[in-house]
């Protein structure tokens, strides 16, 4: 396995393609020269008290200048905290003020702008930063509340890249499309995997007036990637494009993760012959934990895949626990009291089971569990049952207080419009055929838009809040016809 160094890559494979957006192409030698200049621009960091005393924050976007800056920080072994390009000033400051960030970097096209800031150090953060060489601090998705920040070591990224390579393999002409934010582990891992393997990264062209789905489709055509990681919302956008988007034959793997992909979505991709592999991962495990094997046939009842080599998954009291070298060193900032222990494993907030074939099935979040009439109801099971109902694009299930049942099950339906009563009747009919009585929703609430985070994942907290508001405006309108 190669190193996390673009300079080593340039020595080993100087003429090999490193980055392309379909129009501009850089070899590893050319990229190394650009990174060398970024390293020179970062000199004030170490001259005036940068890490090991803390982190540097980087305002990220999808540009080449951002990638050059991140590679320069990796080269200098300076741990960084990437800030999402869509973060508001208030969101940015709320995260930074709780972290040991001593510098803020804003990469520009030809220079790196630096600004020193007060560093909120803690004994816990100092210990983690000094205990092992760290690569990055990354915010979790925060899909159910305020995100935590996990500190991931260089060793964790190397182990994650090894596990991915052992599972998916590298083919001679492989190149990986970067279409996920660099502020999240799914995007940053594309950069580190390709750097370690000395493989090219395909970038999307600069933003234009076209939609995000059109831009993604254009990048797939012009950049000719063979591997793509995307969240279900991006996959859905590609499948919904008009005129119909034809996936190039060169694409051998589409990894979908970050959120559960609906059966409707997976079946639509399978009908077109797209090589979609479901996966399960999280920031605290440095991206992928379990992924379907290449060539896995699509079928009802399949899980998200098998654990990657070197990663162990156990189910304890219905909750997923993860063991292995990809685990984060710990949390820093808000929520730093929660533990991540390499020896005892990491207890996720996700419910799951492992079937006889060794595939992991993710059944939703433990804190989303609904207790109705004394029975435990997992929202993910109801969502999966209703996803294929005609006219339903997405389902979000939650519970509301009920004097009789303790909690009543509510199914939020994202639709294209149409007659709500007809949609509710169809969904209720599907539920009667597929779900036990205590699992059937008592209410169905139709919305044309759900809420999504900056990473494209469903923001459950915001979506449920919008659905609750709509339900409160007229409960009888949304009551299931048989209830």
Image (cartoon, rainbow, N blue to C red):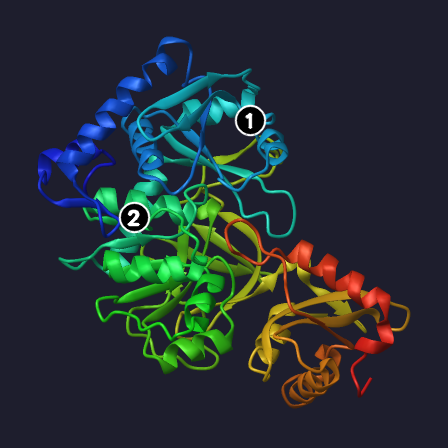
Reply above or below: 468 against 18: below
Q: Is residue 384 shown left or right of residue 217?
A: right
Tell me the quarter of the image containing the C terminus: bottom right
Residue 41 position by quadrant: top left
| Residue 49 image offset from top left, x and y in percent | 42, 11
| Residue 111 image offset from top left, x and y in percent | 33, 24
Question: Residue 161, labelled with which disc?
Answer: 2
| Residue 122 image offset from top left, x and y in percent | 57, 20
Q: Which residue is mark 1?
A: 99
Residue found 44% across the figure and 80% down from its top: 267
Q: Is residue 347 shown left or right of residue 25?
A: right
Looking at marks 2 and 1 on the same chain, the residue that comes earlier in the sequence is marked by: 1
Reply above or below: 17 against 332: below
Residue at the extreme front of the image, as rendered: 209
Residue found 33% across the figure and 74% down from its top: 274
Residue found 34% across the figure and 42% down from its top: 157
Reply above or below: 121 against 71: above
Find numbered disc 1 in the image and state the secondary structure of the residue it sits on.
loop
């Amino acid at each position: 396995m190669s190193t996390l160094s673009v300079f080593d890559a340039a020595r080993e494979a100087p003429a090999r393609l490193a980055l392309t957006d379909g129009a501009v192409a850089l070899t590893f030698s050319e990229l190394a020269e650009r990174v060398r200049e970024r390293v020179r621009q970062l000199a004030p960091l170490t001259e005036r008290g940068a890490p090991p005393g803390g982190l540097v924050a980087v305002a990220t976007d999808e540009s080449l200048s951002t990638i050059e800056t991140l590679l320069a920080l990796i080269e200098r072994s300076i741990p960084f905290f990437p800030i999402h390009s869509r973060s508001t000033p208030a969101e940015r400051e709320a995260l930074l003020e709780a972290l040991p960030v001593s510098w803020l970097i804003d990469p520009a096209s030809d220079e790196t702008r630096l600004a020193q800031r007060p560093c909120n150090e803690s004994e816990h953060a100092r210990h983690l930063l000094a205990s092992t060489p760290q690569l990055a601090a990354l915010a979790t998705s925060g899909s159910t509340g305020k995100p935590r920040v996990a500190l991931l070591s260089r060793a964790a990224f190397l182990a994650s890249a090894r596990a991915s390579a052992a599972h998916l393999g590298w083919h001679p002409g492989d190149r990986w499309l970067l279409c996920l934010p660099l502020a999240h582990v799914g995007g940053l891992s594309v950069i580190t995997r390709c750097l370690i393997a000395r493989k090219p990264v395909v970038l999307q062209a600069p933003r234009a007036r076209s939609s995000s789905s059109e831009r993604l489709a254009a990048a797939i055509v012009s950049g000719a990637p063979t591997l793509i990681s995307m969240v279900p919302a991006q996959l859905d956008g590609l499948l919904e494009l008009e005129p119909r988007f034809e996936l190039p034959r060169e694409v051998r793997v589409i990894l979908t993760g970050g959120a559960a992909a609906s059966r409707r979505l997976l079946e639509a991709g399978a009908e077109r012959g797209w090589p979609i592999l479901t996966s399960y991962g999280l920031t605290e495990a440095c991206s992928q934990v379990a992924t379907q094997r290449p060539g896995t046939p699509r079928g009802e009842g399949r899980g998200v895949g098998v654990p990657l080599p070197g990663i162990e998954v156990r189910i304890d009291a219905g909750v997923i626990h993860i063991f292995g070298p990809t685990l984060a060193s710990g949390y820093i900032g808000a929520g730093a009291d929660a533990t991540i222990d390499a020896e005892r494993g990491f207890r996720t907030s996700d419910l799951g089971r492992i079937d006889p074939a060794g595939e992991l099935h993710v059944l939703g979040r433990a804190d989303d569990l609904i207790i109705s009439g004394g029975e435990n109801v997992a929202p993910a099971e109801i969502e999966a049952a209703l996803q294929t109902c005609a006219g339903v694009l997405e389902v979000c299930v939650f519970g509301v207080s009920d004097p009789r049942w303790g909690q009543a099950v509510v199914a939020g339906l994202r639709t294209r419009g149409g007659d709500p009563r007809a949609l509710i009747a169809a969904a209720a009919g599907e539920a009667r055929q597929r779900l036990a009585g205590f699992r059937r929703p008592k209410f169905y609430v139709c919305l044309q838009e759900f809420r999504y985070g900056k990473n494209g994942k469903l923001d459950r907290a915001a979506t449920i809040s919008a659905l609750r508001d709509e339900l409160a405006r007229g409960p009888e309108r949304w009551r299931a016809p048989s209830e």
